Amino acid sequence: MSGAPRIVSLVPSLTELLFALELGPQVVGRTGFCVHPRDAVRAVPKVGGTKTVDVERILALRPTHLVVNVDENEKPTVERLAEHVPNVIVTHPVRAADTLDLFEQFGRAFDRMPQAARLNTAWRAAHDEARARQWRALRVVYLIWKEPWMTVSRDTYIADMLAQVGLDVIVPTSARRYPEIDWGECPPAEADLVLFSSEPFRFRERDAHAFADAHGLDRRRCLTIDGEMTSWYGPRAIEGLRYLTRLRDAIEERAA
């Protein structure tokens, strides 16, 4: 690579990946949702949100590379920026193991293969630990929004991360990857667990309790879950697998 890259990242989990690959000094722009690594990222200028990007501000930073994601960023905005930014890295992980491809893709793009290899090794170790467990399969509803209630399809990174620890998402009939959920079609009582994610809607324990009471469920079947641990690929996926392993252990201990 000739010259130091100037990188603008519009994807929170991949901003964290850039820092994990020791590229922090080359990250010149990020969204307001790019909050990890918490201390280091504060020094990087914000360029708006993942879907509300300030194009002129980005161009003023003179980036050589733009990091985007199919789900998180708006295609017209990316296309406009691509007219001016020499290198656009488009990502679209839909399986847990796609994180390994991201490590290699970014390692090669920025000449950081040794750092990428270390992340690869750590992910595989966390994954092996999760898959070594002999958990029974559980059917779960995973909620990401309310008014309307929304969930995830099986063709999503979140669903596949949950599947690594034997949590099988219940999905309404819909072609959308993030569909609305009709409780008449998917009665919550038929799920072993209803999981309330901390993002994008910030569900809290009181929301889970209120839902359980409204639907006549045992409150122990309605749990809050850290959305970063299920939806952030990159280095956070390593801790995500460990987090989900601990969660399943806790669920099994409570059921015993």
Image: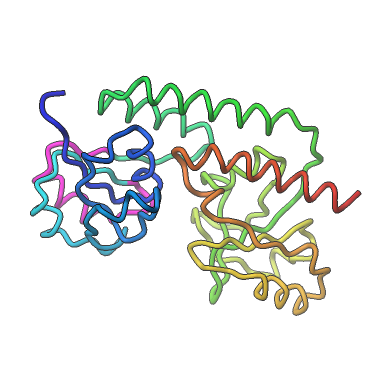
Q: Quadrant of residue 238?
A: top right
- Give the vertical position of 176 relative to 208 (above or below): above
Q: Is residue 52 left or right of residue 215?
A: left
Look at 15% across and 54% down and name the residue there.
Answer: 58
Horizontal side of residue 142 vs 200, given as left or right: right
Q: How many marks?
A: 0
Of 5 and 221, the residue lying toward us: 5
The residue under the point 67% across, 58% down is 141
Quarter of the rendering containing residue 7: top left
Locate residue 128: give its quadrant: top right
223 above or below 61?
Answer: below
At a point 31% along the width and 58% down the height, the residue shown is 50
Q: Is 182 covered by the magenta stretch? A: no
From the top left corner, tell me how far across and down residue 185 is, in percent.
Answer: 69, 65
Q: Residue furthest right?
A: 256
The x and y percentages for residue 57 are 13, 59
Which quadrant holds the N terminus? Answer: top left
Q: Residue 64: horizontal and vertical position, in percent?
A: 14, 39
**In the figure, 94 relative to 192: above or below?**
above
**Residue 142: x percent and y percent?**
63, 58
Front residue (pair 96, 181) = 96
Q: Is 72 inside the magenta-drawn segment?
A: yes
Q: Residue at x 65, y 74 (%)?
A: 207
Please name the colour scheme applied to the rendered image: rainbow
The magenta-colored residue range is 69-89
Horizontal relation, residue 42 to residue 47: left or right: right
> Is residue 84 rendered to the left or right of residue 154?
left
